[in-house]
Image: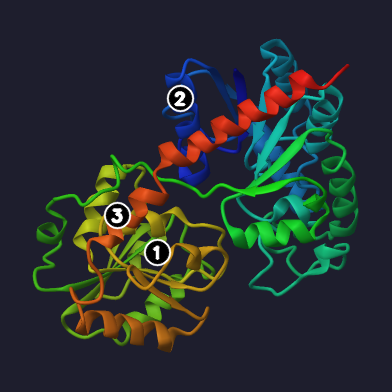
Amino acid sequence: MKVLQINSVCGIGSTGRIATDIHKILVEQGHDSYIAYGRGNARSCNNTIRIGNTYDNYAHVALTRIHDKHGYGSRQATKKFIKKVQIINPDIIHLHNIHGYYLNIELLFDYLISSKKPVIWTLHDCWAFTGHCAHFEYAGCYKWINECYNCQLTKNYPKSWFTDNSQIIFRNKKRLFTEVENLRIITPSIWLKRYAKKSYLGKYPIRVINNGINLDQFKPSQGRFRDEHKLKNKFVILGVSNVWSYKKGFEVFLELSKELKSDEIIVLVGLKEKQLIDLPSNIIGVSKTENPKELAIIYSASDIFVNPTLEDNFPTTNLESLACGTPVITYDTGGCSEVINHSNGFVVKAGDIRALKQQINHFKSSKNKLFGVNIINDVRKQYNCSDRFNDYIALYKELINEKSIIPN
């Protein structure tokens, strides 16, 4: 097989790592694999195609900020990219995040429609079926079920300062995204599948393939993190995020810090410099790291992982923590609760900081009695990236075989 994946980034962030992990499996099995990406530098992958450049990204950002036309810039970059795709002539095209200021969706989908190639689209958020936003759950907006208009989330990603084109964008997306002849939709969570089926994408087959993680990297790991940060006899509450914001729960940890006992401390990984400066004394801030081994040591050194996200799909951070043997307390948002059971953590109603603190206290007072080795075993059985991404390989073959028996 010859497979082309398209994503906003390559080898970094959760979606970038998913793409490169699939790429590695394809190469190991003797297939030809390519990843096209739009921002930053490619990591952990050969056979990459950069779509446009940094200038193109900024121009696309400007178009979005001023005219609310995210997905309608990058025309020349997309034209050049499509010419490269025609030369590669892949058997199957796998879309991930096609938003992110790097692709022109009209040009891309005109090509996908005319080429009649099998297409898989993994939805990592809700952008594919809304007129603007990537997440709507926190805002409680469900206009997208019928048609977006008068968007209340224009100041959210992808941010528009002046204009609301949500109705026009919704109609254009609906037209473009529903004319691909051979398209399969994949969602990492049951939660997202349920919403996708209610959208105009519901005309296509939709299947859940959970995100997986690399269990050779994320496993109980010894290190000096506790020693280096003087955490002996401390109860460590961990939070990890690529970007810390209100919706990722940054303010929740600030509130929790006000009620910590002297033997409790919070560790937050992924903070920006500005956020590191103003932290309370009982929060240890760590800059963003792309080193899985370093992350595994921090997960393993912690007593509990807390994920108070207000919007998410199927966060791999929950899986990473469990794989390192650390239980999880999470808000019941998106697909977060789908990996939590009675033997590995707790689920709390979104926004209920009091209940979150109660569960932390409950776990602390019952430590080593609530959860056991099943924390790790369950993850190894269900969320090994090799198993989950081999599900994609099987789907590729299925679609290619279907195409080969369809008469011209």
- Cα distance, mark 1 to mark 2? 32 Å
> Does residue 406 sit above or below 174 in this rendering?
above
Q: CA distance from mark 1 to mark 3?
A: 36 Å
Q: Which residue is mark 1?
A: 275
Callout 3: few (<14), some (14-19), or many (20+) C-alpha neighbours within 10 Å?
few
**Amino acid bearing label 2:** Cys
Left-right relation of 134 to 368: right
In the rendered structure, which disc, 2 or 3, sits on the residue that comes first in sequence? 2
Residue 45: numbered disc? 2
Name the quadrant of the C terminus. Answer: top right
Q: Which residue was labeled with disc 3?
A: 377
Q: Residues within 10 Å of mark 1 (few under 14, many from 20)?
A: some
Q: Position of residue 285 (x, y in %)?
A: 30, 62
Amino acid type indicated by mark 3 = Asn
Q: Residues within 10 Å of mark 2 (few under 14, many from 20)?
A: some
CA–CA distance in space, label 2 to label 3: 30 Å
- Does residue 53 show up? no
* Left or right of residue 14: residue 402: right
Q: Secondary structure at mark 1?
A: helix
Is residue 399 found left or right of 41 in the rendered image? right
